[in-house]
Image (cartoon, rainbow, N blue to C red):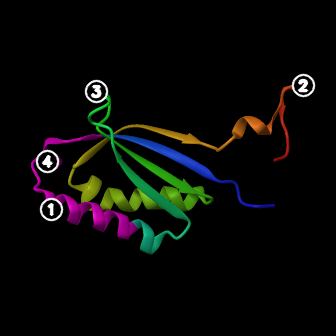
Amino acid sequence: MPARPYTVFMLLKATPHWLALDRARRDEVYDGALMQVYNHFPSVRVRFFDSSGFSGRCSDVLMWETTDMPEYRDAVAALHEHAFFGQRYFEIVEVIPSVPDGWREFDWETGRACAA
């Protein structure tokens, strides 16, 4: 049976510390954060989306994808040690874990989850 995929949406709010950085320093922090994840947590992928022009609630969204939730948890912990979160460049507004097409795993007749 293939490993269950998970997608986690992490809503972020950029802090004044991040907004004060010039583009080169932002690139350096962002690239370092991605390398931290990709080099140490091979089952985790992360993408960064700018939502500041579309939302007042959050300025950015991280979309995490993994089949290994403990490794995802460790990747997030590592970013808390990295400048990305460690220097307070971003505040986490909300974390939304999800499973792709999870509704397909629910048996509507019995009201129970069924085997994937």
- Whether pointer 2 and pointer 4 mark residues with C-beta atoms closer than 8 Å, the reply is no
**Residue furthest to the right:** 110
Q: Which residues are magenta?
A: 13-36
Occupied quadrant, residue 93: top left
Q: Is the residue 40 above or below the residue 69 in the image?
A: below
- Between circles 4 and 3, the one closer to the viewer is 3
Locate residue 45, reporting x and y percent.
49, 61
- The residue labelled by disc 3 is 56
- The residue labelled by disc 4 is 17
- The residue labelled by disc 2 is 109
> Is label 2 in a helix, a strand or a loop?
loop
> Is label 3 in a helix, a strand or a loop?
loop
Q: CA distance from mark 4 to mark 3?
A: 18 Å
Q: Is the residue 83 above or below the residue 88 in the image?
A: below
Occupied quadrant, residue 11: top left
Q: Residue at x 36, y 70 (%)?
A: 35
Q: Earlier in the sequence, mark 1 or mark 4?
A: 4
Locate residue 66, reporting x and y percent.
57, 58
Horizontal side of residue 51 vs 101, given as left or right = left
> Is label 1 in a helix, a strand or a loop?
helix
Horizontal side of residue 49 vs 68, given as left or right = left
Q: Quadrant of the N terminus?
A: bottom right
